[in-house]
Amino acid sequence: MKTAIIHSYNGMGDLIWHLPYIHALAKETKEKKIILFSKKTTNANELLSADPYIEKIIDLDDNRGLFTNILSFLKILKSLKENNIEKIWIFHESIKYAIASIAAGIKERYGYEYGLQKFFLSKKNV
């Protein structure tokens, strides 16, 4: 069972601040590793490429706009399917990642439960 984390914040500081949570979730998996989706602006590839709890880092698109958002959604959906993700933690309030997870067939979806996102997650009050 592959577990992924979507970390969709822009800066390095947010990534470092979330690192203990990323490690804690990785330790709960059978493989003791997660797949991390993160924006290029966090420099995750440079900072965490040797991290023993991260199997792979996949870049999220940084661009904004309707057309790029649609393309980004399709890229995320494709990556989720290609990497056989079965459990996902969404460290962002956007519904885009939750909907992509549903479309990818991921049954275990966890997130912040802000706004509309709460209707697209599988578990409540985590």
Image (cartoon, rainbow, N blue to C red):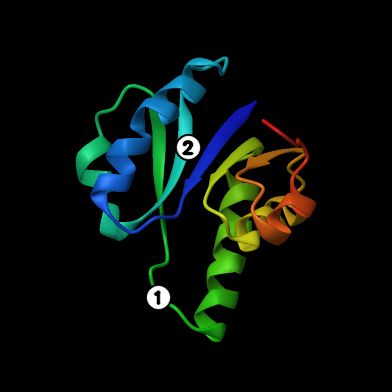
Q: Percent from the top left, x then y, of residue 59?
A: 39, 55
* Label 1: element kind: loop
Q: Percent from the top left, x then y, of residue 16?
A: 28, 38
Badge 2 density bin: few <14, some 14–19, many ≥20, Cα 10 Å: many
Displayed quadrant of residue 107 = top right
Q: Which residue is mark 2?
A: 35
Q: Name the residue nearer the viewer: 9 or 60.
A: 9
Q: Name the residue nearer the viewer: 67 or 17.
A: 17
Residue 47 shown left or right of residue 27 in the figure: left
Q: Percent from the top left, x then y, of residue 3?
A: 58, 32
Observer-side mark, 1 or 2, equals: 1
Q: Amino acid at mark 1?
A: Asn
Displayed quadrant of residue 83 = top right
Indicate whether 13 appears above or below 117: above
Mark identifier at residue 63: 1
Residue 28 shown left or right of residue 9 in the figure: right
Real-space CA distance between mark 1 and mark 2, rounded to the nearest whole angstrom: 22 Å
At horizontal 29% and vertical 27% (from top left) the residue drawn is 51
At horizontal 28% and vertical 55% (from top left) the residue drawn is 11
At horizontal 43% and vertical 30% (from top left) the residue drawn is 22
Q: Percent from the top left, x then y, of residue 73?
A: 59, 67
Residue 97 shown left or right of residue 109 in the figure: left
* Label 2: element kind: strand
Q: Amino acid at mark 2?
A: Ile
Mark identifier at residue 84: none
At horizontal 59% and vertical 60% (from top left) the residue drawn is 94
Mark 1 or mark 2, earlier in chain = 2
Badge 1 density bin: few <14, some 14–19, many ≥20, Cα 10 Å: few
Q: Name the residue nearer the viewer: 36 or 83.
A: 36
Q: Is the N terminus in the top left, top right, bottom left or bottom right quadrant?
A: top right
